Amino acid sequence: MRELVILHGALGAKAQFKQLESRLADHFNVYTLDFDGHGAKSGIEMDFSIEHFVQNVKNFMQENNLEKPLIFGYSMGGYVALKLESLQPGSFEQIITLGTKFDWNPESAEKEAKMLNAEKIEEKVPAFANYLKSLHGEAEWKMVLQRTAKMMLELGKKPSLKPYDFHHIQIPVLLLLGEKDVMVTKEETKHVRELLRNASFEEVPDWVHPINQVPLDELVQQLLNTQLNR
């Protein structure tokens, strides 16, 4: 079977993909990991950066003897996968991204970072606060927010992926975007498709950005279609 590595997004953890992993186990050898500072690794003290998370993936692949796996990167996970492939072409067989934001500039970064205020989240969306606590821990979730906000602001000043980076990527890339995603635009995603040599774009009806609100059955089918169309 093909090997599939699932990469979580900002504020996320591998625990979010337990059901997806179970549903795909008959079709792929599935691997998940927590980026440093997230989930089971939330106690690691560090500044977040795309480059550090790229190294996490490289180390994980070496530890598990993975050669050219299929990658499913949700949100930031897709950004990390594309960055690694741009640095080391041929690292993966194929990359599938979902809801990955590419248009990082000072204005967009500040807008996203302002939403990561722990006190406001606890006050206005306590259910989301509890969800983050379940992923990262009672004491660590606020630090995840702070470090993610700082990383976003840095991305706004200096995006890790620049237009010429995409030209180094020659493997197949599928860019998925939920029709109702309010964080990522169709325009920025289609622009990246044009920069890539072997990419396709699909807007999925009714899907939103949060991965825990994406219909599991439909997501499974999207990834199985990749298996069937090899």
Image (cartoon, rainbow, N blue to C red):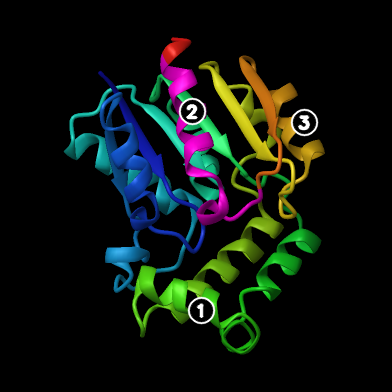
Task: Report the residue marked by disc 2.
Answer: 221
- Amino acid type, residue under disc 3 in the picture: His
Q: Earlier in the sequence, mark 1 or mark 3?
A: 1
- Amino acid type, residue under disc 2 in the picture: Gln
Which is more foreground, mark 1 or mark 3?
Answer: 1
Task: Report the residue marked by disc 3.
Answer: 191
Q: Quadrant of residue 37?
A: bottom left
* Rendered location of residue 210, percent (x, y): 58, 56
* Rendered location of residue 21, percent (x, y): 32, 41
Query: Which residue is rendered at x = 38% and y = 79% of the image?
Result: 140
Q: Is residue 35 visible?
A: no
For the residues labelled 2 and 1, say whether their Cβ atoms are less than 8 Å apart: no
* Rendered location of residue 30, percent (x, y): 28, 34
Query: Which residue is rendered at x = 53% and y = 17% of the image?
Result: 172
Q: Looking at the image, is 189 positioned above or below residue 118?
A: above
Query: Which residue is rendered at x = 29% and y = 40% of the image?
Result: 22
Q: Is residue 193 left or right of residue 128?
A: right
Q: Is residue 148 left or right of residue 28?
A: right
Under circle 3, the secondary element is helix
Mark 2 vs mark 1, CA separation in Å: 30 Å
Dot label at residue 129 = 1
Q: Earlier in the sequence, mark 3 or mark 2?
A: 3
Mark 1 vs mark 3, CA separation in Å: 34 Å
Give the quarter of the figure containing the N terminus. top left
Q: Is residue 214 magenta?
A: yes
Residue range highlighted in magenta: 208-227
- Amino acid type, residue under disc 1 in the picture: Ala
Mark 3 vs mark 2, CA separation in Å: 26 Å
Q: Looking at the image, is 175 positioned above or below residue 121?
A: above
